[in-house]
Image (cartoon, rainbow, N blue to C red):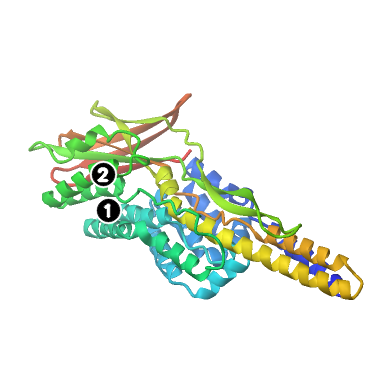
């Protein structure tokens, strides 16, 4: 068996290479900065070229992750222009990834989806526009903010059939593989209450009451269209947003809490119609899992004596999971095709080697080839668990009608054991016929 010498060391190196997955520990300095509110330190950890995260996570294949993570943390740090630059770069790269060269798609069929540049998840692409809208608002550009909200709504229009078209292409190009029974689960998410809420505020703030009324209706429609996502009630303050009394000023608060889901690998063993050892195969899929959100409720307290509760408007983590449904179906389809093709190739080579071995009086060649093929199939199947880490989990909102003036605003975040964090802003100007929106963050 002359091939055995060079083949086994090469296989060993291949397995070592595949085992070098990014550990969550590489994020530790960034996570610590984000959860403690030391956002500048978190940004410095991302930009440190010698850090483990920079070497293993934010590589050339993961540019989108770099700009998403940095853009979100810059937003929390109130570096709104820097945040816009990064988020817009991420959005541009996501658009380019969708029409990328077929060469990367071929590589993903040979090994796994990690061979491709990270293309971004749908929810990431959507919430880029939400946070960029807020960036524009805080830079006194309400028209720019409205452009971002309209862009998000346009993206939602073609989200529904995006993956069904892609799945049809996979089936069309693999007619010889029995994959017709693999279902494609469609996402019910087609309207964002958070985007519509910001639309209501921005249109009202620019005096376009008809447009504000339309977005107000669409916000309520979002709840009825996706009850899996919006399992909670519409915040009570929403109905007051279009009825500000004469001489009063509307003051709104939006708070972001927790951190969005992460992906883990999920494995399934399936039987195959080939001889041992290629008669079974392991499929590896990514699965989204939630991270703990310590915040149970949040209360706004004004120095004038008024106070009000913030209520859940959008569960961003649930949106992430819901919009991943359709893509997950496509991943299952591709992974199954890829694994069957690998196993079939291995079984075919094993039979050919066995036939050759019998002629040369060495019947163990086929078994070895089959075994090595099985090892390759198992080792090369790795789920793509890449995902941005610093979008929030929940968006809470509230509002109150006030006398125009200047206020000190405190938001108290409570968990199961009591107060977690208190954030205070002084000299908050609340003006009549203007958008008066303040943002608070607790990512614990």
Q: How many marks?
A: 2
Q: Which mark is residue 137?
A: 1
| Residue at the extreme top of the image, as rendered | 417
Q: Badges 1 and 2: C-beta atoms under 8 Å apart?
A: yes
Q: Is residue 174 left or right of residue 137?
A: right
As drawn, 334 above or below 311 = below
As drawn, 275 above or below 300 = below
| Residue at the extreme left of the image, as rendered | 246
For the residue carrying disc 1, how many other residues have a C-alpha within 10 Å: few (<14), some (14-19), or many (20+)?
A: some
Q: Position of residue 2 (x, y in %)?
A: 88, 75
Identity of the residue drawn at 41% across and 47% down? 322
Choose top left, top right, bottom left or bottom right for residue 193.
top left
Front residue (pair 285, 124): 285
Q: Position of residue 416 (x, y in %)?
A: 47, 25
Choose top left, top right, bottom left or bottom right for residue 251.
top left
Element under label 2?
strand
The quadrant the N terminus occupies is bottom right
Q: Which residue is mark 2?
A: 437
Front residue (pair 113, 235): 113
Identity of the residue drawn at 77% across and 66% down? 11
As drawn, 36 above or below 415 = below
Q: Is residue 413 left or right of residue 278?
A: left
Element under label 1?
helix
Front residue (pair 10, 26): 10
Q: CA distance from mark 1 to mark 2?
A: 9 Å
């Amino acid at each position: 068996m002359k091939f055995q010498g060079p083949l086994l060391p090469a296989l060993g190196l291949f397995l070592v290479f595949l085992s070098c997955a990014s550990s969550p520990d590489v994020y530790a300095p960034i996570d610590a900065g984000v959860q403690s509110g030391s956002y500048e330190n978190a940004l410095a950890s991302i930009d440190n070229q010698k850090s483990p995260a920079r070497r293993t996570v934010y590589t050339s294949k993961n540019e989108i992750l770099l700009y998403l993570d940095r853009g979100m943390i810059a937003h929390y740090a109130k570096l709104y222009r820097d945040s816009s630059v990064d988020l817009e770069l991420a959005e541009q790269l996501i658009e380019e990834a969708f029409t990328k060269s077929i060469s990367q798609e071929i590589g993903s069929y040979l090994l796994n989806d990690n061979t491709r540049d990270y293309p971004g998840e749908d929810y990431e692409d959507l919430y880029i526009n939400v946070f960029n809208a807020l960036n524009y608002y805080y830079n006194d550009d309400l028209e720019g903010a409205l452009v971002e909200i309209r862009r998000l709504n346009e993206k939602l229009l073609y989200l529904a059939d995006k993956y069904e078209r892609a799945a049809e292409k996979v089936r069309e190009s693999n007619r010889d593989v029995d994959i017709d029974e693999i279902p494609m689960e469609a996402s019910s998410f087609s309207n964002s209450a958070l985007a519509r809420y910001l639309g209501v505020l921005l249109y009202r703030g620019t005096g376009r009451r008809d447009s504000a009324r339309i977005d107000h209706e669409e916000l309520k429609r979002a709840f009825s269209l996706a009850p899996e996502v919006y399992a909670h009630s519409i915040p009570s303050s929403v109905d007051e947003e279009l009825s500000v009394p004469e001489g009063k000023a509307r003051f709104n608060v939006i708070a972001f809490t927790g951190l969005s889901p992460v992906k883990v690998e999920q494995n399934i063993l399936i039987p195959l119609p080939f001889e041992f050892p290629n008669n079974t195969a392991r499929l590896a899929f990514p699965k989204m899992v939630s991270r703990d959100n310590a915040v149970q409720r949040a209360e706004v307290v004004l120095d004038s004596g008024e106070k009000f509760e913030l209520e859940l408007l959008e569960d961003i983590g649930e949106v992430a999971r819901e919009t991943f449904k359709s893509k997950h179906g496509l991943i299952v389809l591709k992974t199954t095709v890829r694994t069957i093709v690998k196993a079939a190739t291995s079984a075919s080579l094993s039979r050919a080697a066995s036939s050759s071995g019998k002629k040369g009086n060495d019947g163990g060649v086929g078994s070895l080839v089959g075994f090595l093929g099985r090892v390759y199939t198992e080792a090369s199947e790795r789920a793509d668990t890449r995902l941005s880490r610093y979008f929030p989990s929940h968006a809470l909102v509230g509002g109150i009608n006030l006398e125009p003036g200047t206020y000190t605003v405190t938001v108290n975040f409570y968990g199961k054991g009591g107060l977690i964090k208190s954030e205070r802003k002084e000299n908050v100007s609340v003006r009549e016929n203007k958008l008066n929106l303040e943002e608070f963050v607790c990512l614990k």
